[in-house]
Amino acid sequence: MTRSDKSQASWGTYCRSYLVTLGGLLGGGSSVFLIAHSSDALTLPWQFSVLLATLLMAGIMLALAGLFGTAEQMERLADATSEYELVERISVVAHPVYLMLRPFYEKH
């Protein structure tokens, strides 16, 4: 593996870790509110419950796409979801996920 191939593999793994992190944050955050709503600790209108359930499903789908998607699909999805200023903060959180995924996706 040449140096450019190695950096391309690292970028692909980092895109995967970004999607897994973003999916975990979306799914985890919305599930906290859904659990609070279902235990009557929080009262939400049904529209918010539907929105939170949609965000939960979107988070699960992003995480699964990051883990099991093809390289082309995963990079396109990472590019599509990385248009905002929040990406810089998520990328800091995604670094530990990258370190955990690196042994599985980068062959040395």
Image (tube, grey):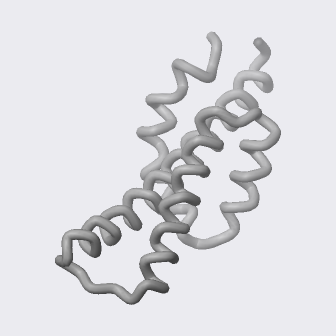
Question: On the picture, is 68 further left or further right than 50?
Answer: right
Q: Position of residue 53 (x, y in %)?
A: 48, 67
Q: Position of residue 67 (x, y in %)?
A: 59, 35
- Which quadrant holds the N terminus? top right
- Which quadrant holds the C terminus? top right
Q: Position of residue 81 (x, y in %)?
A: 68, 61
Q: Position of residue 16 (x, y in %)?
A: 61, 40
Hey, which residue is sitting farthest bottom in the picture? 45
Residue visible at 55% across and 41% down in the picture? 17
Question: On the picture, is 31 further left or further right than 59?
Answer: left
Residue visible at 54% across and 68% down in the picture? 54
> How many marks overall?
0
Question: On the picture, is 5 further left or further right than 38?
Answer: right
Q: Which is nearer the eye, 56 or 45?
A: 45
Residue visible at 67% across and 62% down in the picture? 82
- The image quarter containing residue 36 is bottom left
| In the depicted structure, whether residue 71 falls above or below residue 2 | below
- The image quarter containing residue 85 is bottom right
Q: Which is nearer the eye, 3 or 52?
A: 52
| In the depicted structure, whether residue 35 falls above or below residue 11 | below
Residue visible at 45% across and 29% down in the picture? 100
